[in-house]
Image (spheres, rainbow, N blue to C red):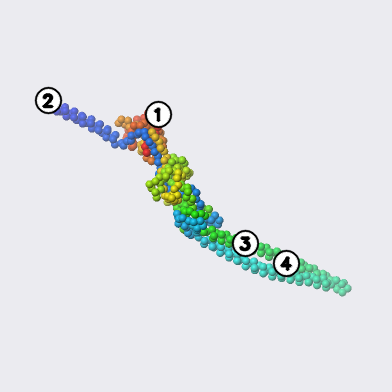
Amino acid sequence: MSRLRIVLLSGAGILLVGWLVATSLAGVFASADKVPTFLAERGRFVHRVDAEGILVAENATPIGPPVSGDGPKKIAWLARDGSAVKEGQVVIRFDPTEMERELYDGEAERDKTVSQVDQRNIQQTTTLDNLARDEQIADLQLEHSRQFQSTDTDVYSRSEIIESQIEEKLAAQRKDHASTARELSAEQGQVELDLLALQKRQAQLTIEKAEAGLRELEVRAPHAGIFVLRRDRGEAAEVGTMAWGGRPIAEIPQLDLMKAQVYVLEADAGGVAPGIAATVTLEAHPGEEFEAAVSRVAAVAKRRNRWSPVQYFDIDLALALTDPERMKPGQRVRATLLVQDLDDVIAVPREAVFRDEEANPYVFRQGGSEYVRVPVTLGPVALGRVVIEVGLESGDVVALQDPTRAQALPEAAEPATGPTGPTGGD
């Protein structure tokens, strides 16, 4: 074999080996490049929560159906929501049908009772007159029997004398009976009249109650202001709906002090507590922000709408400044709550954190051409970000997807027990 051919074959072999090595290395790096990663660095971590709601007055006079009366009242008319009202102006009218029926029934019962009283008085007078006449007749018969009693044994036989004595006793008994019957009839008649008088009084009370209820069906503004309908889960009262006594359906607020009533999704409400700073923007004036602070957080989350299963926390924001010229009750607002603002912490995307069978968190930290499973301690969580308090250092690269395949990854050394300081970003 010629020297030239040997040299060519040797060169080809070297090139082939080099190509195979390069191809193998290129495959390793290509597989590593397929896993998206994140460079963890120390920085600022800000957790903001967005909310929306309306402006409400800190102090307002509740307006609703009268407390007196039984059962709910149907709304027949309402003043326009947000309209200016004057003191004494009618703002709500309720359906008078039920009260008018009660008034009609009360008047009918009263008239019926009055008629029964008149009839009973006539009957009582006639009965007592008849019994008094019977008593007088019995008294005359007794006097007659005593005056003409057969007592002379020389003139009358024994049987006649006994018969005369019996007649006297019967006449005395008839008089006593007539007297007792008159007294009992008078007492019974008085009892019946007393019962009728009680029924008349009850009917009169029904009439007075119905008349008072009719007067209360027109609700007037106790003072000047703006008439604002209250909303329960986003729904306001309207004509035709029922309202219960003692449950206000509207209010007339005092405009000198306002607050924002906002709603935060249950999933985003972690860490929201009284005292947290916030900013409020009026939808009607989007270019200006107003400082505020959380003053109240509802104890439990509730649905804002009956047809939606999503739950929200009801939160009050105390405004640092109330501008009566631009702030009106019921105006829609948007708010931003500053839950966390930390410096010099490590924060990574949420998808970089995984959990084992016991829900312990860990990350995959890149070490050369491999990924090492590292247990971590989590800190505050924001939308899409989570603070790593223990387990990572600034400059570490973590996988955003699980890089494992069939082989098991080597375990990392235990992280430092002291606080390494969290990291993150906005």
Residue nearest the viewer, comparing 132 with 105: 105
What amino acid is at disc 3?
Answer: Arg
How far, Cα to Cα, is label 2 from label 1?
65 Å
Residues at marks 3 and 1 touching, judged by CB atoms closer than 8 Å: no
Label 4 packing within 10 angstroms: few (<14), some (14-19), many (20+): many
Residues at marks 4 and 2 touching, judged by CB atoms closer than 8 Å: no
Q: Quadrant of the C terminus?
A: top left
Residue nearest the viewer, comparing 82 with 133: 82
Of badges 3 and 1, the one in the foreground is: 3
Instruction: Residue 283 in the image: state x and y as whole percent.
Output: 39, 49
Dot 1: what SS? loop
What amino acid is at disc 1?
Answer: Ala
Give whichever of discs 4 and 2 has the lower sequence position: 2
The answer to which quarter of the image holds residue 115 is bottom right
Dot 2 corresponds to which residue?
3
Give whichever of discs 3 and 1 has the lower sequence position: 3
The answer to which quarter of the image holds residue 177 is bottom right
- Does residue 56 appear anywhere in the picture? yes
Instruction: Residue 353 in the image: state x and y as whole percent.
Output: 37, 36
Dot 1 corresponds to which residue?
416
Label 1 packing within 10 angstroms: few (<14), some (14-19), many (20+): few
State left or right for residue 276 relative to residue 151.
left
